[in-house]
Image (cartoon, rainbow, N blue to C red):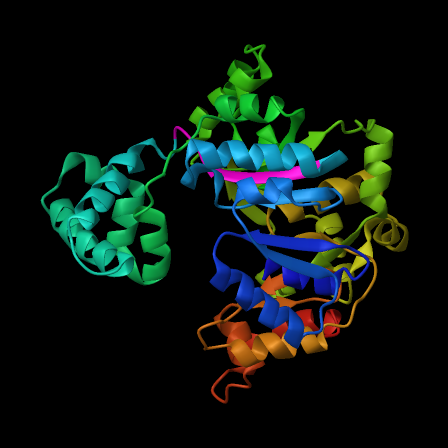
Amino acid sequence: MTAAILAATHPAGRFCGIDVLAAHVENAQRFSAECAIKNVEFHTADFSAAVEANFEGFDYIVSHGVYSWVDEQSQTALRRFIDRHLKPGGLVYVSYYAMPGRASDLPFQRLVRTLGLTLSGDTARRCAAALETVNKLIELKAPALVGSPMAVRLKEHPVDFHLAYLSHELMSANWEPLCVTDFRTEMRSIGLVPVGSATFIENYDSFVLGQAARRTLATIADLDARELARDFLIDQFFRRDVFVRRGRVLDETERRFQLLDSSFALVHPVDAIEYTMKTPAGRLRYDNAVARDIVAALAAEPRPLSDISTEFAHASEDILVNALILSAAGALRPVEGSRIPTRNLNEAIYRRLGGPEEIRFLALPCGTALPINDVLLRLIKGHETIKEDDCRGWRNILAAHGV
């Protein structure tokens, strides 16, 4: 669905989705045909087969929720795929479970899988039955289980997890958290160097680390070893790493110019923005006139930061700093400057709401999508009991995007 929505909102691009499960590909093909999306293609293939396909090269390759859930042979095949198909200057995103944060969940996953394999039924039933036993062991205060954040959260908040997801997650034969140093070594073997994290806030030490921690990290000369030590400080459990092949490093002037020239959009109602953010380093406050003027400007429509700087007569550096903080807090998002019609796309999404192929995202004309939360869902469906005060902010967001 990500590939289809991105293709529909970026008609000048060429998109490709690859999945080993035919049902996923067929679902995406049906959706794309229904929306008349012409610039996306889907392939049922594993990584080994995909390596040999002729894709003419990609500027971006994205692998989410795969790498630490597959065996070493599949990991090698994915790296070969990247090596063959990524263009010079191209970016790669790979997410994976990380050490040390997932270390305490390893015993829990191993136990659920081991118990499940002794039971009968399909994978979902085996997983559900195994979890019943594990929950009883948690009640008996089994040390390794009460020390597992995943096990405790699952027991205390079971409604947050779908059984289909849990069976995929916990019954996997390959479930191995990775150290960032090992992963970077593997990526470096195919000519990729790290750019940063797609979890935006993690790119700023001052947001996630106290001064003493930053001073200690500064004593570690090796960058990869420093990053691993940093993961220990923040107890990192899930990394979203971005790499580049033969990328060009921007100097500070060009970086600032490109960011100021970029368009940003508000993705939360104005009233929901608190101008304070809890971080591992403490609470960050950015309740100032510049931040509020940025939000006020973007409440009407997506705009380049340079336009906001000119309109409100704020220094460009102040605009940039506050926009980056607001982005790290999840209030803003960089978007395309163009506007692409999304009515057909969103009507297809609407028709699937509540069904087996539900898509809980609403496409925006600026090239991105909003998660459909409960308020948005009721608003979209025209729910009679929804209060105007509850939905006014989201109405304004949709109006600003012309949706």
Q: Position of residue 265 (x, y in %)?
A: 72, 58
Name the main secondary structure of what is drawn in magenta: strand
Q: Of all residues shown, which one is farthest toward the bottom?
A: 384
For the question of whether residue 287 can be seen, the reply is: no
Residue 339 located left or right of residue 31: right
For the question of whether residue 288 can be seen, the reply is: yes
Q: Position of residue 14 (x, y in %)?
A: 75, 55
Quarter occupied by residue 79: top right
| Residue at position x 77%, y 67% in the image | 300
| Location of residue 241 with respect to 189 vertically, above or below | below
Q: Position of residue 315 (x, y in %)?
A: 85, 42
| Location of residue 390 with respect to 102 vertically, above or below | below
Which residues are drawn in magenta? 91-100
Q: Looking at the figure, which quarter contains the C terminus?
A: bottom right
| Residue at position x 25%, y 39% in the image | 110
Q: Looking at the figure, which quarter contains the N terminus?
A: bottom right
| Residue at position x 51%, y 86% in the image | 383
Q: Nearer the viewer, residue 23 or 184?
A: 23
Q: Nearer the viewer, residue 197 or 132?
A: 132
Residue 151 located left or right of residue 391: left
Question: Is 45 included in the stretch rendered in magenta?
Answer: no
